[in-house]
Image (cartoon, grey):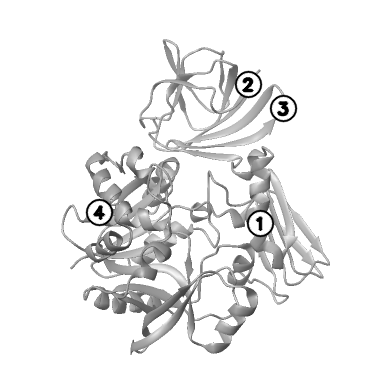
Amino acid sequence: MKLIPIILCGGSGTRLWPLSRDTFPKQFINLKGDTSPLQETIRRSALIEGISPPVLVCAEEHRFLVAEQLRSMGVDSFTLLLEPVAKNTAPALAYAASYILRGEDANLLVLPSDHFIESDDSFLQAVQKATTYSENQFLVTFGIDPVRAETAYGYMLKGKSKEDDVFMVEEFIEKPHKEIAQSYLESGNYLWNSGMFVFQASSYINEVHRNRPETFQKIFDSMSTLKEEKDFVRIGKALYDEIESESIDYAVMEGADNVLVVSLDANWSDLGSWDSMHAANLSDLSNNSIVGDVVVKDTQNSLIRAESRLVVALGLDDLVVVETPDAVMVTKLSESQNIKRLVSDLKKIGRIEGSIHQKGFRPWGYYENLKKGDLYKVKRILVRPRESLSLQLHRHRSEHWVVVRGVALVTLEENIFELKENQSCFIPEKTKHRLQNKKHFDLEIIEVQTGSYLEEDDIVRFDDDYGR
C-alpha cells in the first residue's frame, strides 16, 4: 500500500511574534538556515523510498505562498487542499483522508509543516516502523522522550510494550502544570505528543465516523462540492463552516482503542515559542541564540534576533529581543509562552502589526512597505519572471513607478510600453493599469503612492491571471 505525506500548513505561530504573523506564519519563515520549516518537512518526507507526492492542507490566503515555496525547491508534483475556514486538525485530516479515498486506500504520513527534526535517519526508521503497524489498522503516533518539564506540549502515557520503542497509548494528557510535568519527566513513563501520525485513510475515517458522526457526515456531504483547479482543490464553505473545530487528539485519538506510539529520538522541536527556538539555536558559549546583525557583550541565556538593522545587547540575562522592520519585542525568555496573549491584545486595540507583515506575499511575487505618512506610502515591489499583476485601478490614490532592476511591461489605459532601469511613469487615480514581467529574471520597482486612502483594499480588478 502506498504512503502519502499529508502536510498540515495551518496555524499562525503567534508565540513567535513579531517574526510570525497571520499573513506570514512561522512555517514559511527561514527560522533555521536558508529554508523554511515547510520546505524542510517536504525535503525530509521525500527521503522515504517510494513515497507518493505530498498532499498539503492550507488556508485559502496562503495558497500561493505554499505553491511558491514548493516550486522554489523544485517540487512540481503536489496537491493543495484549501480549507475555506480553519477547523483544527481533526476536520482537516478528515478532509484529506476523504480526498484520498476517492481513489485507493493508502497509508497517510501526517506531518505538521512547522517542526524541527535534526536526525533524518531516526525519522526514517520511525516512519518505517510505524507504517508496519499502520498496515494492521493501528493508528500510530510519534512520541518524544521529554528532556525537561515542558508545559507547552501534550503528553502520552505509555502502556503495554509491543516491541522496543513501540507502546500502546494508555492516555493522552493536555498541557500540564509545571509540577505535573516535572513528575512526568521523573517517572520515565510519559512521552511528548509530537502531533505526527501514520494511519490508513480508511482507519482514520472509520474512527471519525465512530467518535464524531456529525463531523463525518458533514465531510462526507461536502465532498460532493469539491472543485479541482490546476493547482488547488476547494471544498464548499457552507457545510465545512458548520463542523466543530477540534484537534485530532481530542476528537479521535482519545476515543480510539488501537493507538500505538513509536518513540522518536531525533532532537525534535515544534519551534512553537521563543524559548524552544532558543534551545534549538544555541550559537555561543554563553547560552545565547544569536541571529542576524547582532553584537553582544556580557550577555547570557538570551535570544537576540535582528531582521533589518544592527541590534546591540549589553548585560542581558534571560531575555528575548526580536527586531523586525515595524516592531521590536522584548520579554523574559521564561515568559515567552505568554506572547500569544500579547498579540491578542494588540489585535483588540487595532494594531495591524499584530497580524500583518510589512512584506505582503502575492502569487506574482511580493511587496514590502518601506515608509508611510498621512498622504503617502513607499513600497518595494518584486515581480517574479513571467508573472503579472492584475489589470486594476485605484479610486483614492495615484502611483509613481521607478524601475530599479529588470524590465517592466506597463499597461496604462490603452497604452502598452516598456520601462527599463532608472525609467519611471505616473499612474493617476481611477486609471486602469497593469504591471507585467515578461522576462526570465526578476523585476524590481519602487512604488510611491499618494492620496487620501492608501490601504490594500482600494483596488478594482478587471482581469487577473490568478482568479482573484
Q: Residue furthest top?
A: 414
Label 3 CA crowd tier, 10 Å (few <14, some 14–19, many 20+):
few
Tell whether 198 sits left or right of 422.
left
- Per the image, label 3 sits on a secondary structure element best described as loop
- Which label number is shown at residue 373? 3
- Which label number is shown at residue 163? none
Q: Residue furthest left?
A: 104
| Among numbered discs 3 and 4, the one appearing first in the sequence | 4
The residue to which callout 1 is attached is 339
Q: Nearer the viewer, mark 2 or mark 3?
A: 2
| Among numbered discs 3 and 1, the one appearing first in the sequence | 1
The residue to which callout 4 is attached is 98
Residue that appears at 36% across and 51% down: 57
Residue 426 locus on image (x, y percent): 57, 16
| Among numbered discs 2 and 3, the one appearing first in the sequence | 3
Tell whether 331 sits left or right of 175.
right
- Say if mark 4 contacts mark 1, CB within 8 Å: no
Q: Nearer the viewer, mark 1 or mark 2?
A: 1
**Kind of residue at badge 1:** Ile
Residue that appears at 62% across and 35% down: 369
What is the distance, in whole Å, between disc 3 and disc 1 at their CAs?
A: 29 Å
**Kind of residue at badge 4:** Ser
- Quadrant of residue 209 in the image? bottom left
What is the distance, in whole Å, between disc 3 and disc 4 at their CAs?
A: 50 Å
What is the distance, in whole Å, between disc 1 and disc 2 at their CAs?
A: 32 Å
| Among numbered discs 4 and 2, the one appearing first in the sequence | 4
